């Protein structure tokens, strides 16, 4: 599903974010990528999203080598990857339904399809009764559920969650992680990028640990010990 093959990412000024990183994530896995600030976690997300290229090595997603992906192919790639961020990135003047529907509208999907699919996705995240509300009328945990719904709207093979609980309290954090587990049970590959030790240790799933741009540990049932 996801292959990093000897990936190095360098930035101007002699900054190396990733150093010869290699790993393979199988379809349907739930993997946490952990490490302290500056370890290279977000760089992995950016490379998978084709926001920037690797300096050396190969990045392969679902059999598609995206190392030298063409700009016109990026939208097709991003429909295969749902991404959830720490800040919810919701449109404040649109309802919850409209926020999720917007991801389909920009791709030119017909309204009949949108009216069918959006309620289905809102049901998955437990917000079918909030469709007509606005983001400011929801709690932080509910707003993050909306962003997850939006990420799922194209039925992606992979869901990447980049610090999805960073702005949430303990209760909402637990609910979001439970939702990610549920999504993973639908055979969606989930990659959780986080520095939350408690979340990772409670999951009891595979953990890839980064330190200063290198993988220092890859455990099938791991713990975050840094």
Image (tube, rainbow, N blue to C red):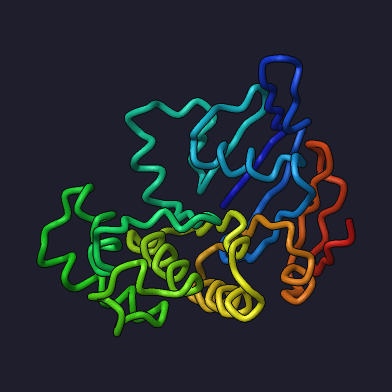
The quadrant where residue 30 appears: bottom right
Count of marks, rendered view: 0
Residue visible at 56% across and 58% down in the picture = 161
Residue displayed at 48% across by 54% down: 83
User: Quadrant of the rendered structure where residue 67 is?
Assistant: top right
Q: Is residue 197 above or below residue 19?
A: below
Q: Position of residue 179 (x, y in %)?
A: 53, 76
Residue 32: horizontal and vertical position, in percent?
70, 60
How far across and how far down the image is residue 117, in percent? Answer: 24, 70
Direction from residue 71 to residue 119 in the image, left or right: left
Specify the farthest residue to the top. 13
Against 207, residue 180 (above or below) is below
Q: Is residue 100 above or below residue 171?
A: above
User: For residue 100, what is the image quadrant?
Assistant: bottom left
Q: Where is residue 178? Give x, y as percent.
A: 58, 79
Describe residue 156's horizontal placement relative to residue 178 as left or right. left
Residue at 42% over, 62% down:
147
Residue in front for this viewpoint, 101 or 28: 101
């Amino acid at each position: 599903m996801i292959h990093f093959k000897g990936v190095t990412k360098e930035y101007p000024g002699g900054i190396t974010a990733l150093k010869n990183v290699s790993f393979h994530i199988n379809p349907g896995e739930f993997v946490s990528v952990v490490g302290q600030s500056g370890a290279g976690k977000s760089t992995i997300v950016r490379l998978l999203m084709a926001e920037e290229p690797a300096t050396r090595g190969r990045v392969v997603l679902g059999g598609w080598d995206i190392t030298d992906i063409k700009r016109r192919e990026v939208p097709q790639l991003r429909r295969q990857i749902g991404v959830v961020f720490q800040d919810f990135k919701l449109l404040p003047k649109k309802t919850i339904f409209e926020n999720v529907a917007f991801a389909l509208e920009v791709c030119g999907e017909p309204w009949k399809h949108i009216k069918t699919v959006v309620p289905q996705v809102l049901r998955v995240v437990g917000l079918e009764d909030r469709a007509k509300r606005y983001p400011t009328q929801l709690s932080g945990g509910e707003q993050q559920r909306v962003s997850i719904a939006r990420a799922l709207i194209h039925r992606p093979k992979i869901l990447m969650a980049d610090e999805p609980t960073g702005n949430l309290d303990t209760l909402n954090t637990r609910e979001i992680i439970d939702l990610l587990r549920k999504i993973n049970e639908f055979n969606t590959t989930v990659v959780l990028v986080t520095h939350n030790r408690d979340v990772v240790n409670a999951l009891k799933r595979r953990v890839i640990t980064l330190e200063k741009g290198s993988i220092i540990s890859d455990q099938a049932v791991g713990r975050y010990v840094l």
